[in-house]
Image: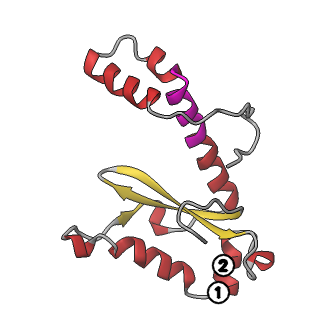
């Protein structure tokens, strides 16, 4: 797979890393054409079919910033990987927040905020030129 290439994936679950006090969600997915894809449909399948993989993923995320002199990362939700359903809800929530940001809806909601906050939101809103597809709130986001 070349850098920047887009591949179809199957969402399996999600891990909640805490970065500077905020949730930094790590989606666990598999390439839809991977030889393991037919056997992995949810995070529990990864634990059963590929023992030790989830622990290795968690430890990689815990330690990957240490060489840069940063402390080990910490996790929310008792360090548990959440299932596919939970992951899809988080993805939908993040997608909705993103749409509010780039359509200017978030900016309109901040009328009572100071100019610095409004300016930041305005820059973020205008910086993304991705075309929004018409996705209903109850639909699974497509990527």
Left or right position of 91 against 56: right
Asked if 121 appears above or below 44 in the picture, the reply is: above
Residue 93 counted in the magenta span = no
Q: Quadrant of residue 121?
A: top left
Q: Position of residue 86 (x, y in %)?
A: 64, 55
Few, some or many residues within 10 Å of mark 1 (<14, 14–19, 20+): few
Asked if 138 appears above or below 122 in the picture, the reply is: below
Q: Residue at x 58, y 36 (%)?
A: 130
Q: Main secondary structure of the magenta part?
A: helix
Residue furthest right as drawn: 38
Q: Which mark is residue 50?
A: 1
Q: Which residue is mark 2?
A: 46
Foreground: 72 or 103?
103
Foreground: 101 or 78?
101
Marks 1 and 2 close (CB-CB < 8 Å): yes
Q: Residue at x 73, y 34 (%)?
A: 135
Foreground: 128 or 49?
128
- The N terminus sits in image quarter: bottom right
Left or right position of 89 against 3: right
Circle 2 — which element? helix
Left or right position of 100 against 113: right
Circle 1 — which element? loop
Segment colored magenta? 94-104
């Amino acid at each position: 797979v070349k850098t920047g290439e887009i591949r179809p994936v199957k969402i399996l679950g999600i891990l909640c890393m805490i970065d500077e006090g905020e949730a930094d969600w790590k989606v666990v997915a598999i390439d839809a054409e991977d030889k393991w894809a037919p056997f992995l449909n949810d995070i529990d399948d990864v634990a059963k079919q590929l023992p030790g993989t989830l622990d290795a993923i968690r430890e990689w995320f815990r330690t990957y910033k240490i060489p840069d002199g940063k402390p080990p990362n910490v996790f929310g939700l008792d360090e548990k990987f959440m299932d596919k359903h939970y992951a899809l809800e988080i993805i939908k929530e993040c997608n909705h927040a993103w749409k509010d940001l780039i359509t200017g809806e978030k900016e309109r909601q901040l009328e009572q905020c100071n100019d610095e906050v409004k300016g930041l939101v305005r820059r973020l809103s205008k910086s993304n030129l991705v075309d929004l597809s018409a996705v209903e709130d109850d639909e699974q986001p497509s990527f």
